[in-house]
Image (cartoon, rainbow, N blue to C red):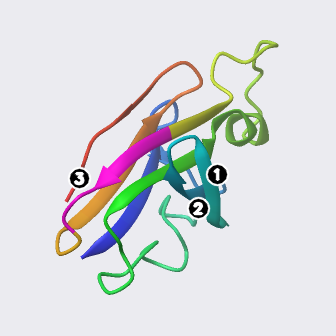
Amino acid sequence: MGLSTHVLDTMHGCPAAGMQVALYTTQGEQANMVKSFTLNSDGRNPDGLLYDNASLRAGTYRLVFDVSGYFKAKGIELPEPNFLNRVSLDFGVAKVDEHYHVPLLVSPWSYSTYRGS
């Protein structure tokens, strides 16, 4: 239970190890950073869950993924300006007794997400 994320690099077919990510709580236009972290070799938060079941609260959140920084670090030549710079995903948590997994599938030119399990 709780909140987790996972990023897969669809250009290279691998986890997005080394990508910088930030987690925020949001209220309207106001956003407060909770933590920032670098994805591990499996494309996940090295500390595990972003929130465990006891800490997760109903409300709205934002995950911000540094897509261009990740692909530039991989040696990919990107146009200026980049098509994707940072991907921000705003989502809501309604039922704190359920697991919210927010994966990102990303390339320099596209991304998709869904509520995973």
Q: Amino acid at mark 1?
A: Met
Q: Amino acid at mark 2?
A: Leu
Residue closer to the observer: 52 or 58: 58
Q: Which residues are magenta?
A: 89-95
Q: Secondary structure at mark 1?
A: loop
Q: Secondary structure at mark 3?
A: loop
Task: Tell me whether circle 2 and circle 1 mark residues in contact (CB < 8 Å).
Answer: yes
Left or right of 49? Residue 58 is: left
Viewport quadrant of the C terminus:
bottom left
Q: Is residue 28 magenta?
A: no
**Measuring 48% from the left and 21% from the top, which residue is drawn there?**
110
Residue closer to the observer: 14 or 43: 43
Residue closer to the observer: 96 or 109: 96
Q: Residues within 10 Å of mark 3 (few under 14, many from 20)?
A: few
Q: Is residue 93 magenta?
A: yes
- Quadrant of the image occupied by residue 75: top right
x then y, percent, for residue 76: 73, 28
Tag shown at residue 116:
3
Left or right of 16? Residue 78 is: right
**Measuring 69% from the left and 35% from the top, which residue is drawn there?**
71
**Measuring 48% from the left and 64% from the top, which residue is drawn there?**
44
Read off the residue under disc 2. Answer: 39
x then y, percent, for residue 22: 62, 56
Viewport quadrant of the N terminus:
bottom left
The Cα atoms of the two marked residues, 1 and 3, are separated by: 20 Å
Position of 35 relative to 21 (above/below): below
Q: Residues within 10 Å of mark 2 (few under 14, many from 20)?
A: many
x then y, percent, for residue 36: 66, 64
The Cα atoms of the two marked residues, 3 and 2, are separated by: 18 Å
